[in-house]
Every structure is written in structure tokens, then in C-alpha cells.
């Protein structure tokens, strides 16, 4: 039985040492172990049975697999996925990941735990080893092509080792048949090596940079310069040889010159660990900040900068860098953007979305940046590509200052949750630039005395008399009749029909005298408001579609005095927009009437404290009936 610490899912809080149990029996590892010991049986995991269900979700197996238990297995301290020790085999060989030592089942059991987390082995296809490594450590992976490695790559690797990061390196293969080919100098192509050390030695009066690499097979080593028994070592004094732990053991571990490493290897992967994954307090650590968010269709799923009209609606995260790196001008940080739980959802048809991010210099004024900002400002830095990987990470060095990072999917309207992690050399502060809800309602205008009315106002009085009839008051039915007639006239507004209920809402908003009808003055104030809202609709219907898209609506609402949080905007889109995320004028009018009603009620009740109101159940229900 293996009990794995699932710390890899990013969490906003430091990962607690006591891992969360995820076995369906509700039993912890200790309890499961105890019951196995008592009954003298080997553990069988009913949650992840030894059958094809656990291997595949769509493919039929080509061969009959036999599930076997390995002769011995290893314990690790880091466990919280409980699995049994049955592994899928065919002709007595492990089917999936295996190590050269046929008795070493550690990696295979790890993979099984990982497969269980993700539902089946097939769900792992297309994932990389580093992704599994990330998942088991909570770290962030970085990929470097050695051909394009930065100038200070030796220093980057040195720092990575000091931070306890996991380092892998490999040689590319052109095709699958080349995989595991041995080069004349003893290196294996397409094979995952680890980097275990860096150092410098005095050699004929020069400082030579060396790197120590390990072949996880525990054998087959580099035989070029600085390898175990190479002549270079004879010119290095014994003390230095001792410091470097130079031995001629065929243990898979060897030194090579850093410059040879750069020409013979193609790729280096660094898995940067979060401080909570490191036991050793002496290690240097990254400062890590977490940020969770979502891309929601119609409100925050804005797509990349190619889509200027929607890009600005993405979540915007302010990043403040205050302290320079030790002895450096800039501040180094890694920004890692991860889409959440897509691998698990693969079974249900969810593929990885194409994701990435851009970084802008923060302007002086605070708050969510608008479309115009992005129209006139270029990004300062960005992820190299938008790519359909679970995580996109990139290293940057920027001068101290405030920046805005915008995570997005490539295409707009694509939904996912995401997690953004910033690994920084010195402390960095991140903050979501979501808007606070802030409602700014104009004072209702004072009535004009009848004798001072302009000609236009007198004409309006005539209109009112026609609408109101003999009682000189407009009922909901009368309002419904006149509004639908007027809106039908307009060619630039699409609208379905304003219902009687909507008209009752309008009356509820405008009826200051409380008789359920609109007198002349009330009707006049409403008519001005209607005209203003129509003007805003025409102004912010940027594409002149006659409808308001959810994105256009956001700006229009702000201009109408309603600055809303991302969450409220999402609710409004759910309630009023159609499946193409469009609102006709009647939906738009309903939305504004309701918002203004709610805003006015809140204003009148929050006299003492501008941010809160206190209501009992009776007050609350009667309030909802009025909005
Ligand atoms: Ca060796
Ligand atoms: Ca009235
Ligand atoms: Ca439009």
C-alpha cells in the first residue's frame, strides 16, 4: 500500500503536513493499513480496481493485461493517495512506466497513484514526466532548450539546486526508434537524466565549470572529458577531488564540463518547488504567491489581445515588485499559469485549452483597465506562446514597479478555472483588480413649474395626456402600450416586447407618490431616463448590431453609474443575455430598471453606514417584492 501526499494541486494556503484522505471508504491510510494488518490480507483498492476500467476510458485493450503485485515495495513519507500494489503487466513486464531495475517499483507505483488521481492510465497520455513531478511536489516546471539557454544559465541552475529544485535533462530524438540509442560518448538519447550538482575546479590555472549528471538506471555513464576515469582528474588536486566527491564508481553518476553538457544535451527541465515542499530549512527558497480565478463566458472569458473588444474583460492581476534581486538591477520571478482539472475532465470530452498571459506596465490610476488602455499600450512581456498545455510558465526579470498580468485563453468565451503562481526571488505582492461594486445614482430632477415650461415640455404634456387618459395617471397597462409602440419605431434597437411585469417594475421605480401609477412629473422623469439609457445603448453598441453584447454591456452599465464586481456581472449575463451573450433593448432596460431600483432602495436604507444595511426577514421579503 502506498500513501502519497497530494500536495501538487496548488492551494492558496501553505500545504498542511497532514494530507487530505481521498479514499471512498472514508478511512485514512493508517486505518486502512491497520485493518489489512489485522486481517492479514494485502490491500485491494476498490476505488481503482485491477481491471480495464482503470486502464482506459475510451480504448479497448489490445492484449489481456494481468495485474501483479511486485515482490517488494518502498515507503515514502509523502503520501495521501491510497492505492494497492497491483500493477498492470503483460508477459510479466510492466505495461506503463518502469525502471531498468526490474525490482524497483517505486516509479510504477507513483504512476499508479497519479493515474488514480486522474481517473485512469489513459488520461495520462500526452502528459510529461515533469507534469507528474509537478503534481507530486506542487512545483512549477520550466523548460530550457540548451541551444537558446540564457547567458547566466550556470547561475540559474546553481540557484535552482540551492533551492532544492528537481532538475532533469535529456537529448532529443528525431523519431521513436532512436529512443534509448547510445551515443559513442555513452549518453542515452530520449532518456531522462537528472542534474545533481554544479561546481568549478582549478585546471591548469583556469576555473572550469563542471556539472554532475545522473543516469537513473544506476549505470551507463558519459565517457568523455571529466568522466569517472578521464585523464583531466589527474591535474586536479586531491582536496578538490574529495570536495567534488569524485569517484570512479559505475553508479550512473558522472561529471562533465558545463560547455560539453551544453553541446551534448538538448533540454533541461527545472521543477521549482514551493517552500512548503522543502524539508531542509537551510535551502534558499522562492517566495510564492497564489492567485485563483476563472474565465467565465460572457464576463471574464475575454481571449487574448487579438480580441481587443473582449481582452480587457479578463481577470487582471496587479503584481508589485519592490525588492531587487541580490546585487542585481531587476527582480526575477516565474509566472506559472495553470488550467485546473482539465486532465480529469478528459473523460467527458474536455481538452486542454490554449492559454497564456501578457504583462503590462501598471498605469498610475488604480482599477480594472479598460479596452482603450490595451488599444494604446503594448505589453511589456508575455508568455512565449499560447499553448494547449496544462501549465504555461516563464521566467522574467523586470525593474521594481507595478505591473498588470492578464491571464487568458487564446480564444474568447472559453471557460476554465485557473491558478496563477508567482515564484519570486524577493517578496512580491499580487492583487486582483476586480471592481468594487459602486453605484452612483443621479438626484431625481426637480419639477419645472407648469407656467415656465418650454415648448418641448408642453408638447410632452400633450403626449402624457394621450397616454394617461382621463384620470391623468399612467397605469402599468398604459405604460406597456406606449413603450412598445415607441420602441417599435426605432430601427437601431432590437427588441422583443416589454412585458406588463417590466412596466410594473418601472412604475415601482418611478412612483414616488406611492399610488402604483405615474403622474405627469413621475412620467416625465422616467421619460428623460429612458432617453438617456437609449443614448447609452446606441453609444456602446460598438458593432452596431442593435443588441448589447455582455462585454458592451459592462461599459454601458458603468457609464450609467453602475460599477459592478465580476461576480455581479456574471449574474446579470446569466439572467438577461441570450445564448449568444446578447441583450435586446428590452432585456437591457429591464436590467437597468432593476439595478436602479435595488440601488435606490439600498441608498435609502443605508443612511448610517454607506456599505451595509440591516434587514429582518419581513423587511427583506417586502423589499424583494418591490424590486
Ligand atoms: Ca560514476
Ligand atoms: Ca404615482
Ligand atoms: Ca452590439
Image (tube, grey):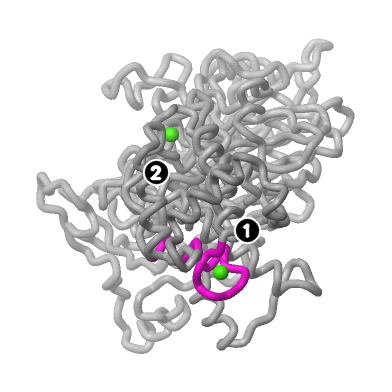
Left or right of residue 551: residue 490: left
**Which residue was labeled with disc 1?**
12
Q: Is residue 31 magenta?
A: no
Residue 538: x %, y % from top left:
50, 34
Counting from the top left corner in percent of width and height, residue 559 is at 63, 42
- Numbered label attached to residue 487: 2
Q: Is residue 197 above or below residue 561?
A: above
Between residues 322 and 45, which one lies in front from this camera angle?
322
- Quick check: 503 above or below 372? below
Looking at the image, is mark 2 or mark 1 earlier in the sequence?
1
Q: Residue at x 73, y 28 (%)?
A: 361
Return the x and y of residue 506 as percentages of the image width and height: 50, 61
Q: Residue furthest right?
A: 327
Which portion, as a residue range, is magenta?
501-519
Residue 556 in sight from this viewpoint: yes
Q: Secondary structure at mark 1?
A: loop
Amino acid at each position: 500500500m502506498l500513501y502519497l501526499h497530494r500536495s501538487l494541486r496548488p492551494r492558496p494556503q501553505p500545504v498542511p503536513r497532514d494530507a487530505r484522505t481521498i479514499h471512498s471508504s472514508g478511512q485514512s491510510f493508517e486505518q486502512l493499513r491497520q485493518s489489512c494488518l489485522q486481517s492479514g490480507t494485502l490491500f485491494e483498492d476498490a476505488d481503482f480496481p485491477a481491471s480495464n476500467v482503470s486502464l482506459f476510458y475510451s480504448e479497448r485493450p489490445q492484449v489481456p493485461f494481468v495485474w501483479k503485485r511486485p515482490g517488494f515495495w518502498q515507503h515514502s513519507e509523502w503520501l495521501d493517495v491510497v492505492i494497492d500494489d497491483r500493477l498492470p503487466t503483460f508477459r510479466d513486464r510492466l505495461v506503463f512506466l518502469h525502471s531498468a531495475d526490474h525490482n524497483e517499483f517505486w516509479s510504477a507505483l507513483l504512476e499508479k497513484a497519479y493515474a488514480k488521481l486522474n481517473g485512469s492510465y489513459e488520461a495520462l497520455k500526452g502528459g510529461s514526466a515533469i507534469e507528474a513531478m509537478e503534481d507530486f511536489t506542487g512545483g512549477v516546471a520550466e523548460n530550457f532548450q540548451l541551444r537558446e539557454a540564457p547567458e547566466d544559465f550556470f547561475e540559474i541552475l546553481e540557484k535552482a539546486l540551492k533551492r532544492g529544485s528537481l532538475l532533469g535533462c535529456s537529448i532529443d530524438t528525431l523519431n521513436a526508434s532512436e529512443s534509448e540509442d547510445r551515443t559513442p560518448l555513452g549518453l542515452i538519447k530520449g532518456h531522462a537524466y537528472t542534474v545533481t550538482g554544479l561546481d568549478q575546479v582549478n585546471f591548469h590555472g583556469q576555473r572550469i565549470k563542471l556539472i554532475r549528471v545522473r543516469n537513473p538506471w544506476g549505470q551507463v555513464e558519459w565517457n568523455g572529458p571529466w568522466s569517472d576515469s578521464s585523464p583531466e582528474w589527474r591535474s586536479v588536486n586531491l582536496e578538490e577531488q574529495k570536495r567534488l566527491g569524485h569517484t570512479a564508481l559505475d553508479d550512473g553518476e558522472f561529471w562533465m564540463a558545463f560547455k560539453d553538457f551544453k553541446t551534448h544535451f538538448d533540454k533541461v527541465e527545472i521543477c521549482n518547488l514551493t517552500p512548503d515542499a522543502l524539508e531542509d530549512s537551510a535551502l534558499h527558497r522562492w517566495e510564492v504567491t497564489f492567485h485563483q480565478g476563472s474565465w467565465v463566458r460572457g464576463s471574464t472569458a475575454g481571449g487574448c489581445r487579438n480580441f481587443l473588444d473582449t481582452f480587457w474583460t479578463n481577470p487582471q492581476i496587479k503584481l508589485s515588485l519592490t525588492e531587487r534581486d541580490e546585487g542585481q538591477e531587476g527582480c526575477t520571478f516565474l509566472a506559472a499559469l495553470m488550467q485546473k482539472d482539465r486532465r480529469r475532465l478528459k473523460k467527458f470530452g474536455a481538452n486542454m485549452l490554449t492559454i497564456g498571459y501578457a504583462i503590462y506596465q501598471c498605469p498610475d490610476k488604480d482599477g480594472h483597465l479598460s479596452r482603450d488602455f490595451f488599444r494604446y499600450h503594448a505589453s511589456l512581456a508575455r508568455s512565449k506562446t499560447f499553448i494547449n498545455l496544462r501549465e504555461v510558465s516563464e521566467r522574467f526579470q523586470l525593474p521594481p514597479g507595478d505591473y498588470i498580468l492578464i491571464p487568458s485563453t487564446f480564444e474568447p468565451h472559453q471557460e476554465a478555472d485557473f491558478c496563477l503562481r508567482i515564484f519570486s526571488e524577493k517578496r512580491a505582492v499580487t492583487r486582483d483588480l476586480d471592481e468594487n461594486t459602486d453605484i452612483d445614482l443621479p438626484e431625481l430632477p426637480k419639477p419645472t413649474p407648469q407656467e415656465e415650461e418650454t415648448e418641448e415640455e408642453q408638447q410632452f404634456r400633450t403626449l402624457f395626456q394621450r397616454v394617461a387618459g382621463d384620470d391623468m395617471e399612467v397605469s402599468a397597462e398604459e405604460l406597456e402600450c406606449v413603450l412598445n409602440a415607441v420602441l417599435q419605431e426605432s430601427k437601431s434597437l432590437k427588441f422583443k416586447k416589454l412585458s406588463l411585469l417590466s412596466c410594473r417594475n418601472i412604475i415601482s421605480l418611478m412612483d414616488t407618490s406611492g399610488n402604483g401609477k405615474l403622474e405627469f412629473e413621475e412620467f416625465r422623469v422616467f421619460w428623460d431616463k429612458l432617453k438617456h439609457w437609449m443614448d447609452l445603448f446606441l453609444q456602446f453598441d460598438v458593432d452596431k448590431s442593435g443588441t448589447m453584447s455582455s462585454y458592451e454591456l459592462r461599459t454601458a452599465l458603468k457609464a450609467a453609474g453602475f460599477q459592478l464586481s465580476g461576480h455581479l456581472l456574471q449574474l446579470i449575463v446569466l439572467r438577461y443575455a441570450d445564448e449568444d451573450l446578447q441583450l435586446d433593448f428590452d432585456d437591457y432596460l429591464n436590467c437597468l430598471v432593476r439595478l436602479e431600483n435595488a440601488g435606490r432602495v439600498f441608498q435609502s436604507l443605508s443612511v448610517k453606514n454607506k456599505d451595509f444595511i440591516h434587514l429582518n426577514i419581513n423587511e427583506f421579503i417586502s423589499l424583494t417584492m418591490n424590486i
